[in-house]
Image: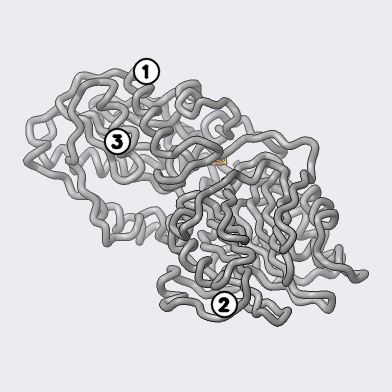
């Protein structure tokens, strides 16, 4: 994909398995696409304490070797910083040490009432060691433990009911792992079984990498307590209503992941078929923009009968451009990312399939590059609706100003990027591709599935 969307972290946890910490390292490696700024692992030491290791950088840098020792449970996190900025202090998991027992948290998502909660907690004397909204979980749990006691489902229920927004949250104590999902179910979270133990991960692909088959998703509003007694499920909110982030299917998740029963590649391929039905085109070749435009391109090609060609080659050793934290790095990365195959492109009418357009600058560069490679016509087809609104749930689209479709019509965007024609998948088409209507589509439609608190003013 050529856009500039930023990812929103990944979590992985293991309970009751020998070598848990190293299994988490493996799982995090397969969630690396969800965040590259930093990562960490918190694990039981087998003697009643929790150990934390974390740093900035890729999993392979922070954990260059197998993580040896430790007990039979661990949680980990890969970070892309959407709230709070960079620095090792903001890298998760967070470890909270209390007289009644330590606990660690790892969170994927973004809280919409973080400012309000931080203000309230600070007034009560809570101290924050980072600027990450994820620390709020620990602060709220800690204040619930003031009179003694330990982490429990009733305490978690009380805390989670105060929090609005997106969270797939893991909480590790010496004797239990809690896997929780917000009541809107924005971010995925899968559970698998390994021997007598359990594994939980943001995407099913990370479970498979650890040799575990996903048995089910944690449901919106659910707390799953995993302990030596097995799993125990409870729901902290009666108002749970799924609005899974559509962008997980469109772009973020790996194609080999299944989210809530739907394979990501299959979703994208179907969206490509519907894209052709809604926006047909006469062309010689279908070209998918690597990586996340490829599945939709297969669908478009199958539906149209236009041959699919690998006319754009990704340089595997250049990081995904939009992950780079500064605009300057991002621009350099875009030019280095893709190479056109001139012998396939020259004189051909191309229908180019990409998954979204954010600022339009990279699509414009792509079109220019394809013209320079000799394309006779370039018809851009986008396998999602136009992005017009900010996301408050963990995807780094912070204002309408950075979204070209928020201020220009489809025709104007097409002219700006230099394509012969441009069209997008409809919202109805997107839901049809997923076979479901309970998706969050707020960045397309502006209909937010939760209260957005003070963010209302920042659009
Ligand atoms: S607003 Fe868009 S990116 Fe954010 S959660 Fe909803 S669908 Fe996903």
| Badge nearest the viewer, 2 or 3 | 2
Q: Is residue 136 at least partly visible in the picture?
A: no
Where residue 350 appears, as percent x and y from the top left, is: 19, 30
Q: Is residue 282 above or below residue 96?
A: above
Answer yes or no: disc 2 within 8 Å of ligand 1.
no
Mark 3 Cα shell of 10 Å, populated few (<14), some (14-19), many (≥20): many
Q: CA distance from mark 2 to mark 3?
A: 45 Å
Q: Residue at x 63, y 58 (%)?
A: 107
Mark 2 Cα shell of 10 Å, populated few (<14), some (14-19), many (≥20): some
Q: Is residue 266 at least partly visible in the picture?
A: yes
Q: Is residue 201 above or below residue 150?
A: above
Q: Which residue is mark 1?
A: 278
Q: CA distance from mark 1 to mark 2?
A: 50 Å
Where residue 184 appears, as percent x and y from the top left, is: 67, 39
Q: Which residue is mark 3?
A: 417
For this view, does 2 lie left or right of residue 144? left
Q: Which quadrant would residue 103 be assigned to in this image?
A: bottom right
| Badge nearest the viewer, 1 or 2 | 2
Q: Nearer the viewer, residue 223 or 362?
A: 223
Q: Which quadrant would residue 138 be assigned to in this image?
A: bottom right
Label disc, if present, on residue 53 of the rendered structure: 2
Q: Quadrant of ligand 1?
A: top right
Q: Residue at x 36, y 40 (%)?
A: 360
Q: CA distance from mark 3 to mark 1?
A: 21 Å
Q: Is residue 398 above or below residue 26?
A: above
Closer to the N terminus: mark 2 or mark 3?
Answer: 2
Q: Nearer the viewer, residue 418 or 45?
A: 45
């Amino acid at each position: 994909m050529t856009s500039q969307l930023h990812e929103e972290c990944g979590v992985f946890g293991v309970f009751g398995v020998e070598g848990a910490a190293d299994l988490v390292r493996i799982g995090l490696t397969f969630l690396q696409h969800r965040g590259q700024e930093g990562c960490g692992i918190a694990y039981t030491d087998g003697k009643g304490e929790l150990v934390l290791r974390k740093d900035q950088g890729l999993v392979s840098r922070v954990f260059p070797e197998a993580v040896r020792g430790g007990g039979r449970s661990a949680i980990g996190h890969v970070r892309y910083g959407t709230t709070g900025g960079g620095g090792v202090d903001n890298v998760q998991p967070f470890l909270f040490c209390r007289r009644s027992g330590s606990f660690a948290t790892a969170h994927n998502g973004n809280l919409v009432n973080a400012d309000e909660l931080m203000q309230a907690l600070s007034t009560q004397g809570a101290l924050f060691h980072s600027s990450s909204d994820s620390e709020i979980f620990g602060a709220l749990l800690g204040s619930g433990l003031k009179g003694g006691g330990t982490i429990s489902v009733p305490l978690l229920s009380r805390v989670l009911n105060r929090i609005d927004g997106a969270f797939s949250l893991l909480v590790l104590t010496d004797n239990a792992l809690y896997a929780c999902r917000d009541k809107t179910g924005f971010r995925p979270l899968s559970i698998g079984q390994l021997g007598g133990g359990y594994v939980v991960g943001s995407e099913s692909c990370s479970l498979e990498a650890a040799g575990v088959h996903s048995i089910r998703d944690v449901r919106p509003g659910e707390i799953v307590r995993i302990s030596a007694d097995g799993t125990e499920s409870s729901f902290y909110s009666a108002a749970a209503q799924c609005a899974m982030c559509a962008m997980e299917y469109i772009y973020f998740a790996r194609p080999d992941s299944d989210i809530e029963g739907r394979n990501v590649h299959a979703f994208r391929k179907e969206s490509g078929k519907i894209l052709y039905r809604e926006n047909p085109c006469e062309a010689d070749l279908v070209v998918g923009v690597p990586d996340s435009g490829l599945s939709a391109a297969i669908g478009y090609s199958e539906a149209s009968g236009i041959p699919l060609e690998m006319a754009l080659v990704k340089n595997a050793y250049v990081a995904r451009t939009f992950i780079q934290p500064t605009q300057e790095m991002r621009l350099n990365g875009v030019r280095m990312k893709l190479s056109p195959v001139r012998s396939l492109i020259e004189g051909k009418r191309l229908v180019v399939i990409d998954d979204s357009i954010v600022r339009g600058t990279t699509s414009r560069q792509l079109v220019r590059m394809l013209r320079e490679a000799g394309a006779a016509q370039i018809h851009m087809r986008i396998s999602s609706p136009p992005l017009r609104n900010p996301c408050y749930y963990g995807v780094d689209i912070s204002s309408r100003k950075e979204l070209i479709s928020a201020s220009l019509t489809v025709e104007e965007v097409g002219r700006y990027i230099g394509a012969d024609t441009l069209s997008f998948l409809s919202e109805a088409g997107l839901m049809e591709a997923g076979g479901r209507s309970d998706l969050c589509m707020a960045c397309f439609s502006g209909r937010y599935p939760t209260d957005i608190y003070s963010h209302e003013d920042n659009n």
